[in-house]
C-alpha cells in the first residue's frame, strides 16, 4: 500500500528525534532485505543533483572529455543545479542495472532515497516524491505509519 499525503501529515506530528529514530531503524531493516538491482527505478527515472566538486571526478570515471561531459550528459535544471540530461542515467547498464561508476557516483545517488538523514522532518516533502520511485522508501514510510497509527 502506497503511503498517502495524509500519512505525511501524521509523520509531521511526530517529534523530530523520535521520527529520526523510526527512520534509522526502518531504513536499516528494509535495506537489509532490499536488492536495489532488481529495481533501479531511481537510476531509470531520477536525475541526481551533481555537486560542482564532483564534476572532475565524474568526467574522469565516465571516461569522457570535459567538452563531451557538458555537451552530452549534464545540464543545469530550473533550480540552478547540475543534473544528468536524460533518464535512464547514462551510467546505468540497462542489462544488469549496475552503475558503471558505482564507487564514484554522485553524493545524491549515494544518499538516495534519503531515508536515513537526521532531521527527517525537513526531508518529508522530498520523501513524498521519492516514494513514487523507490519501493524501499515507500515500505519504510509505510512501516513507520503503521507504528504511529
Image: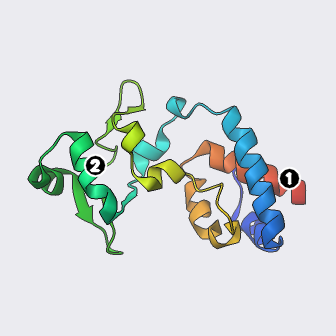
Binning the other alpha carbons within 10 Å of mark 1 as few (below 14), some (14 to 19) or many (20 upward) gives few
Q: Quadrant of residue 13?
A: bottom right
Q: Between marks 2 and 1, how big is the CA–CA gap?
A: 40 Å
What x and y, as percent, mark residue 33?
Answer: 69, 31
- Nearer-the-camera pick, 147 or 122: 122
- Seen in the image, is 140 located left or right of residue 10? left
- Determine the secondary structure under disc 1: helix
Q: Which residue is drawn at 59% across and 30% down?
A: 35
What x and y, as percent, mark residue 105?
Answer: 39, 46
Of badges 2 and 1, the one in the foreground is 2
Q: Residue 146 carries which label?
A: 1
The residue identified by callout 2 is 58
Q: From what the image shows, is residue 134 above or below residue 95?
A: below
Q: Residue at x 73, y 54 (%)?
A: 141
- Determine the secondary structure under disc 2: helix
Can residue 84 be seen here? The reply is no
Binning the other alpha carbons within 10 Å of mark 2 as few (below 14), some (14 to 19) or many (20 upward) gives some
Q: Residue at x 80, y 68 (%)?
A: 17
Q: Which mark sits nearer the N-terminus, 2 or 1?
A: 2
Q: Where is the C terminus found, in terms of image quarters? A: bottom right
- Seen in the image, is 46 located left or right of residue 35? left
What x and y, as percent, mark residue 69?
Answer: 17, 52
Q: Which mark is residue 32?
A: none
- Seen in the image, is 127 located left or right of residue 149? left
Can residue 115 be seen here? The reply is yes
- Nearer-the-camera pick, 83 or 145: 83
- Seen in the image, is 26 located left or right of residue 105? right
Q: How is the image coloured?
A: rainbow
Q: From what the image shows, is residue 16 above or below residue 2?
A: below
What x and y, as percent, mark residue 37?
Answer: 50, 30
Q: In which quarter of the image is residue 15?
A: bottom right
Q: Which residue is drawn at 15% across and 43% down?
A: 64
Amino acid at each position: 500500500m502506497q503511503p498517502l499525503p495524509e500519512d505525511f501529515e501524521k509523520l509531521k506530528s511526530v517529534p523530530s528525534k523520535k521520527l529520526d529514530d523510526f527512520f534509522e531503524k526502518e531504513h536499516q531493516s528494509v535495506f537489509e532485505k532490499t536488492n536495489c538491482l532488481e529495481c533501479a527505478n531511481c537510476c531509470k527515472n531520477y536525475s541526481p543533483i551533481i555537486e560542482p566538486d564532483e564534476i572532475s571526478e565524474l568526467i574522469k570515471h565516465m571516461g569522457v572529455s570535459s567538452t563531451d561531459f557538458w555537451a552530452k550528459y549534464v545540464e543545469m535544471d530550473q533550480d540552478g543545479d547540475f543534473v544528468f540530461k536524460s533518464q535512464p542515467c547514462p551510467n546505468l547498464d540497462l542489462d544488469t542495472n549496475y552503475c558503471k561508476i558505482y564507487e564514484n557516483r554522485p553524493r545524491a545517488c549515494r544518499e538516495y532515497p534519503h531515508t536515513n538523514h537526521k532531521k527527517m522532518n525537513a526531508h518529508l516533502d522530498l520523501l513524498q516524491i521519492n516514494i513514487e520511485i523507490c519501493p524501499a522508501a515507500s515500505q519504510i514510510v509505510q512501516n513507520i505509519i503503521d507504528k504511529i497509527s
